[in-house]
Image (cartoon, rainbow, N blue to C red):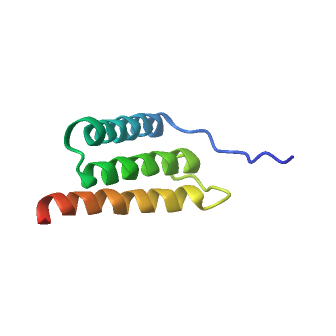
């Protein structure tokens, strides 16, 4: 078994990670209990993916695999898509 060594996550990354998790949770609660609008679910999933990508990449440090980077990209695209759906639809 060969564990992958991760770079230590900095304090700024910890704060951003907590913020992304809280915003993603708020958006999912908004989807489940209040509006059940698709854009709320999409943005909740997007923020969660960005938090996962931040955790996997240790806030921009070189990672051994690209899973975190791709998750962050996909999350950012989902969040931008939900913002566009709100204001353009």
Q: Residue furthest bottom?
A: 88
Looking at the picture, does residue 17 appear above or below residue 53? above
Query: Which residue corresponds to the image point at 51% horizontal and 51% vertical from the top-left?
Result: 53
Q: Residue furthest right?
A: 1
Number of marks in the rendered image: 0
Position of residue 5 in the picture relative to residue 78 (left or right): right
Q: In this orientation, which residue lies closer to the viewer: 5 or 20? A: 20
Query: Which residue corresponds to the image point at 73% horizontal and 45% vertical from the top-left?
Result: 5
Position of residue 56 in the picture relative to residue 85 (left or right): right
In this orientation, does residue 25 appear? yes
Query: Which residue corresponds to the image point at 13% horizontal and 66% vertical from the top-left?
Result: 88
* Residue 13 pos. (x, y %): 46, 40
- Give the quadrant of residue 34: top left
Query: Which residue corresponds to the image point at 30% horizontal and 39% vertical from the top-left?
Result: 32
Q: In this orientation, which residue lies closer to the viewer: 15 or 31? A: 31
* Residue 39 pos. (x, y %): 26, 54
In this orientation, does residue 59 appear? no
Position of residue 17 in the picture relative to residue 24 (left or right): right
- Give the quadrant of residue 78: bottom left
* Residue 14 pos. (x, y %): 47, 35
Position of residue 39 in the picture relative to residue 53 (left or right): left
- Give the quadrant of residue 73: bottom left
Q: In this orientation, which residue lies closer to the viewer: 56 or 45? A: 45
């Amino acid at each position: 078994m060969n564990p992958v060594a991760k770079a230590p996550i900095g304090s700024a990354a910890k704060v951003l990670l907590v913020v992304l998790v809280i915003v993603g949770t708020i958006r999912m609660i908004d989807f489940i209990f209040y509006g059940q609008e698709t854009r709320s679910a999409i943005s909740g999933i997007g923020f969660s993916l960005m938090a996962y990508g931040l955790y996997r990449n240790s806030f921009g440090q070189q990672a051994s695999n690209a899973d975190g980077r791709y998750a962050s990209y996909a999350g950012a695209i989902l969040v931008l898509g939900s913002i566009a759906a709100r204001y353009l639809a």
